[in-house]
Image (cartoon, grey):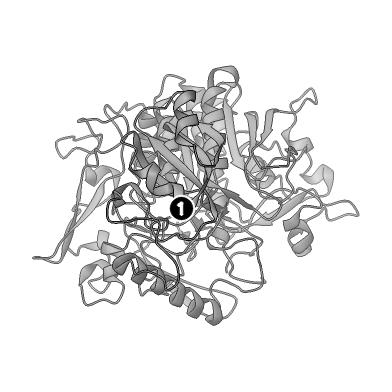
Amino acid sequence: MKSNQKSQITSGRKDRPLNSPAFSAAWSRALGLALLMLSAIPSYAGIRPVLDNNTPTAKFSRDLQQRGGNGMVTVIVQFRAMPATASFKSMLTGGGAIKSRLHAIRAVTMRVPVSMLARLANDPNVAYITPDRPVNLTSVNEAYTTAVEADVAAAQFGLDGAGVGVAVIDSGVADHADLHNASGASRVVYSQSFVPGDTTTADKYGHGTHVAGLIGGTGVSSGVANGYLAKFAGVAPNVNIINLRVLDQNGSGTDSQVIAAIQQAIALKDTYNIRVISMSLGRPVFESYTLDPVDQAVEAAWQAGIVVVVAAGNRGRDNSMGTHGFATIGVPGNDPAVITVGATRTFNTATRVDDAIASYSSKGPTLVDHLVKPDVVAPGNRLVSLLAAGSTLDKANRALEVGPSIVGTPKYFRLSGTSMATPLVSGAVALMLQQNPALTPDQVKARLMKTAWKGFNQYTSSLDEYGNTYSNQYDIFTYGAGYLDIDAALNNTDLATGVALSPTAVYDPSTGCVSLINTTSVVWGSTSVVWGATSVVWGNSVVWGANTIQGTSVVWGSTSVVWGANSISGFSVVWGATSTTVSPMSAFSDGDDGEN
């Protein structure tokens, strides 16, 4: 294994592992500086701030408030009502241009002079302005089929995902025999690139192809007949893949590219029966999910009837701010509507009783909103799936190619991360919707969480390549509702009513205890939440597997954890911080070969 680098907080460079002493020190300094900037909002010497005393600061994200000078900036402007074309012309008087229209969230991407930002903010129709932030990947292969009971789908139910469309918003999907149907035709039924200046929809980075294979690969190129000791098939090997490429050859993209892809998935929903969006990418949290434009986009997809499955992130080892990996969930995994997925390791055994959390899997609660995340966990460590030959990841990590035992060209690749856990859940959702197309996204989420296996040991530890030990405990901020159990989900017939929003954790300073309350603030609004205290079927003791959800019981682990006392160094970060340093939207896997 080469490095502990997990791409959620990288920009495509691989010159310094994220968990090395050098990185930890650098990240600590950078994050500390960012938090200081957020709390004090100082003026930089020699730079005139964008905002004057008459500008409504609430309309600006904090990372935009101190932009100064006379240069140009690309921003996403959210409106209360989408303006007419004539209004845009008037609005852009003095320079600037519209790059894209994001109707799904009533927004546009603009390239404008910095001096124009204050005028935009004073427009009563403008709701919120953010930079067009970069986004990152979230990815490491062990045996996972039996761990999540995926092998029963075909054997017991005859399900393979046929007819269901899964939109893979990632780095593209390469042509591969395992993504063809029995007649030899590709099941990648639609492809489009949202990478500026690059219309190629193939996978130059090598991440999206791996993800697509875990969702819907047939394994036809593997098995004994092809010189492999195992068959590497996806969870739903007959789904249709909608390839929406947003990440470049380095695994990086921007908010506007991701939003445009989500918007296109919504537009194509009926044409290709898109019922699932799989997103193994993200970036840090800068504001509440109620303002973040990417979160608003995934909520629009959810409301349109598409289940959105998102990787939690790979910062579970990050203790640069004293949080022991807590409060590191990325965007859009911080949204209460979506299914946010953490990663486990299976130790290459067929049973799940010895499985444990991967130490790099990001943990909740989410920054700003304090939502309980992840929602579920699934295997993500050292998973073998499809190789995009010649891609950036492939060329940089030849040792991770998985070839036949006889002479032949490798067709598979090994990756690790929450990027790999996410498509397993996406495939499971496709099976559920093939079985019962009438299920709503909230019913799918509630059923997956209720039926998740909850038999973890209370404590576990693991080693990275440097010999560092990482300890984890069984709590709802680490494992969520539990371990994906496809057999249980397909055998369950309960139908939840209301919305299945992830709950909010509330810290009571008078008692030092944390409790859960319903989350109701989303785009579409609701007073009916699945996890209501009066609901027997969907009560907290059933969904999260504990007899209590407050105090310092087993569900919260020991009394020494971050949220237990305000004397803990990371306490103010977990319960008070609003942002981290800028890093690109990217895939949550980058060639790190997982952990032992």
Q: In this view, does 454 lie to the left or right of 172?
A: left
Q: In this view, does 481 lie to the left or right of 404?
A: left
| Image mark count | 1
Residue 449, compared with residue 167, is above or below; it is below
Across and down, in percent, residue 64 comes to: 42, 55
Mark 1 element type = loop
**Residue under numbered circle 1:** 312
Residue extending farthest to the right is 407
Q: Is residue 34 among the parts visible in the rendering?
A: yes
Q: In which quarter of the image is residue 273?
A: top right
Indicate the quadrant containing the N terminus: top left, top right, bottom left or bottom right: bottom right
Question: Badge 1 local density, few (<14 within 10 Å), some, or many (20+)?
Answer: many
Q: Quadrant of residue 222?
A: top right
Name the residue: 39% across, 55% down. 286
Across and down, in percent, residue 115 comes to: 45, 51
Across and down, in percent, residue 82 comes to: 41, 27
Q: Which of 38 and 99 is in front in this view?
A: 99
Q: Is residue 557 left or right of residue 13?
A: left
What kind of residue is marked 1?
Ala
Residue 418, compared with residue 238, is above or below; it is below
Q: Nearer the viewer, residue 587 or 80?
A: 80
Across and down, in percent, residue 569 comes to: 29, 77
Name the residue: 38% across, 44% down. 119
Q: Which of 120 and 289 is in front in this view?
A: 120
Indicate the quadrant containing the C terminus: top left, top right, bottom left or bottom right: bottom right
Residue extending farthest to the left is 510
Q: Is residue 467 among the parts visible in the rendering?
A: no
